[in-house]
Amino acid sequence: MPNKTEETNAVKQVRHQPARLDDVDRKLLGLLSADSAQSYAELGERLHLSAPAVHDRVKRLKRDGVIRATVAKIDGCKVGRTLLAFVLVNTKNVVSTKRLLTLNNLPEIEEMHTVAGDSGVMLKVRVRETEGLEELLGKIQDIEGVDGTRSYIVLSTFVERGPDPAL
Amino acid sequence: MPNKTEETNAVKQVRHQPARLDDVDRKLLGLLSADSAQSYAELGERLHLSAPAVHDRVKRLKRDGVIRATVAKIDGCKVGRTLLAFVLVNTKNVVSTKRLLTLNNLPEIEEMHTVAGDSGVMLKVRVRETEGLEELLGKIQDIEGVDGTRSYIVLSTFVERGPDPAL
DNA sequence: TATGAAAACCTAAACAA
DNA sequence: TTGTTTAGGTTTTCATA
């Protein structure tokens, strides 16, 4: 029979529960979310820890899903996607929302969220030029049950980062 | 007198100009934007390149700003930020927009863009709970010249990634 | 309060890029 | 050489008995 501790851990591992993190974990996450290319020795210096101790923490944070991945941040303009926009799509009902969600593999779509309200979907899209947006909007509006779209063209980006792990 | 190639390069290096990228670069960027922890040997295998050749390309892509950074992707829920929302802020004029932009260091704010239309700002925010959003909206609405806000609470996230470097 | 399990840390050493 | 990873051993923490 599993003891109490094991049961508690099992419950804690339920999807989307916050992880148990101390101040050092949060500081480490902050450092890694800014630059994950630092060596463990360097991180250890900032955290007053040895390199293997940092390594252990990183391993645990990855195992627990707090760190989902380490990725390269690409400059959209440099790869030819110069126009950023948010598109709010109104759908008639849940069925049409599901049809819309099948567009998830389009390379222009960077984010896709369902939002509360009138069966809506929020998209963050990055396209080559205005024509790219026009084409994309066409694909969206062709979907049965899509009532309409409202686009917000981005002029300047002032902040673009991940979740702040600070308490 | 500088030759044609030098002139072209100088012009190309202007801010926000697309970089010159071949198909291998784009494939490499695709791999790195999914997982930057792969070894050069592994990447080389997928690209039919030697490890040092991959290393050279990565170095160039970083130098040219195509790769802006390599960062750890943090799970917002796991660090206690369970509520994601987009907030569209209407401001009276450019001066009030600038005042709003001074909130850029708030930890709840993940993205901040000015958008075309009626002097608007689009925010992507991640907060602890609904009260966190209420508090944040309070701070925004306290700013002189802020007409109003419209919030889109995210129910589910289906796609959340960086720019697709494919052509 | 006592105690055993688990976690966190360090040094040292092996290993890989 | 530098950086990553494993191993071994000590201390701390913490949930129970």
Image (cartoon, coloured by chain):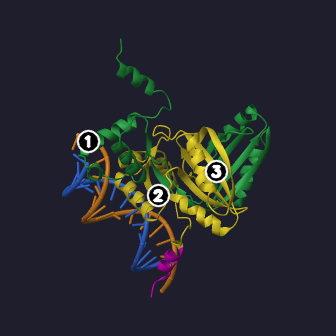
Chain colours: A yellow, B green, C blue, D orange
Question: Magenta span covers which residues?
Answer: A1-11
Q: Residues within 10 Å of mark 1 (few under 14, many from 20)?
A: some
Q: Report the disc number at residue B53.
A: 1
- Local SS, label 2: strand
> Do the residues indicated by labels 3 and 1 lie within the same chain of the protein?
no
| Chain letter of the residue beneath label 2 in the structure image | A
- Camera sees residue A134: yes
Q: Residues within 10 Å of mark 2 (few under 14, many from 20)?
A: many
Q: Amino acid at mark 1?
A: Ala
C-alpha separation, residue under disc 3 versus residue under disc 1? 40 Å
* Residue found farthest to the top: B1
| Chain letter of the residue beneath label 3 in the structure image | A
Kindly indicate the quadrant of the structure image that contains residue A160: top right
* Residue found farthest to the bottom: A1
Q: Residue at image x 58%, y 54%?
A: A139
Q: Amino acid at mark 3?
A: Val
Q: Residue at image x 59%, y 60%?
A: B80
Number of numbered discs visible in the structure rendering: 3
- Local SS, label 1: helix
Q: Nearer the viewer, mark 3 or mark 2?
A: 3
> Do the residues indicated by labels 3 and 2 lie within the same chain of the protein?
yes
C-alpha separation, residue under disc 1 versus residue under disc 2? 29 Å
Looking at the image, which is closer to me, A54 or A108?
A108
Q: Residues within 10 Å of mark 3 (few under 14, many from 20)?
A: some
Residue that label 3 marks: A87
